[in-house]
Image: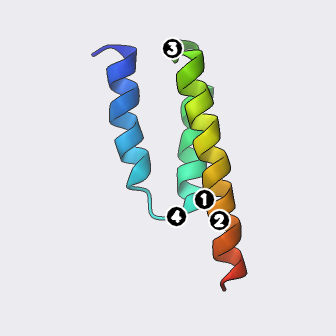
């Protein structure tokens, strides 16, 4: 499996995480552990998704 194929498979696992905090944690770990195998575009995509999940987390906290 190529790094890109692994990345795509992992993205699907991230999407299934229950809470924004879990998704954020998983994406940060992915960058930390496999950042050297990911393209700049893939890392930028993960960082954008982290920002979105952080916004969702903030919105969720405001609704409680």
Q: Give the quadrant of the N terminus.
A: top left
Q: Are the residues tagged 1 and 3 within 8 Å (C-beta)?
A: no
Q: Are the residues tagged 4 and 2 within 8 Å (C-beta)?
A: yes
Query: Does 32 sit above or below residue 16?
Result: above
Q: Are the residues tagged 3 and 4 within 8 Å (C-beta)?
A: no
Q: Nearer the viewer, mark 2 or mark 3?
A: 2
Q: Are the residues tagged 1 and 2 within 8 Å (C-beta)?
A: yes
Q: Categorize mark 1 by other alpha carbons within 10 Å: few (<14), some (14-19), many (20+).
A: some
Q: CA distance from mark 3 to mark 4?
A: 26 Å
Dot 2 or dot 3, earlier in sequence:
3
Query: Does 43 sit above or below residue 28?
Result: above
Quarter of the figure with residue 35: top right
Quarter of the figure with residue 30: top right
Q: Categorize mark 2 by other alpha carbons within 10 Å: few (<14), some (14-19), many (20+).
A: some
Q: CA distance from mark 1 to mark 4?
A: 5 Å
Q: Are the residues tagged 1 and 4 within 8 Å (C-beta)?
A: yes
Residue lying at 67% horizontally and 48% vertically, measured from the top left: 51
Q: CA distance from mark 4 to mark 2?
A: 8 Å
Residue lying at 60% horizontally and 59% vertically, measured from the top left: 21
For label 3, the residue is 37
Query: Does 59 sit above or below residue 37?
Result: below
Callout 3 secondary element: helix
For label 1, the residue is 21
Q: Where's residue 41, x and y in %? A: 56, 21
For label 2, the residue is 57
Quarter of the figure with residue 54: bottom right
Q: Categorize mark 3 by other alpha carbons within 10 Å: few (<14), some (14-19), many (20+).
A: some
Query: Does 54 sit above or below residue 13?
Result: below
For label 4, the residue is 19
């Amino acid at each position: 499996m190529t790094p890109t194929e692994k990345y795509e498979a992992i993205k699907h696992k991230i999407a299934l995480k229950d809470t924004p905090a879990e998704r954020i944690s998983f994406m940060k770990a992915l960058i930390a552990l496999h950042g050297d195998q990911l393209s700049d575009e893939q890392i930028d995509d993960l960082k954008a998704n982290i920002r979105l999940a952080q916004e969702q987390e903030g919105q969720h906290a405001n609704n409680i």
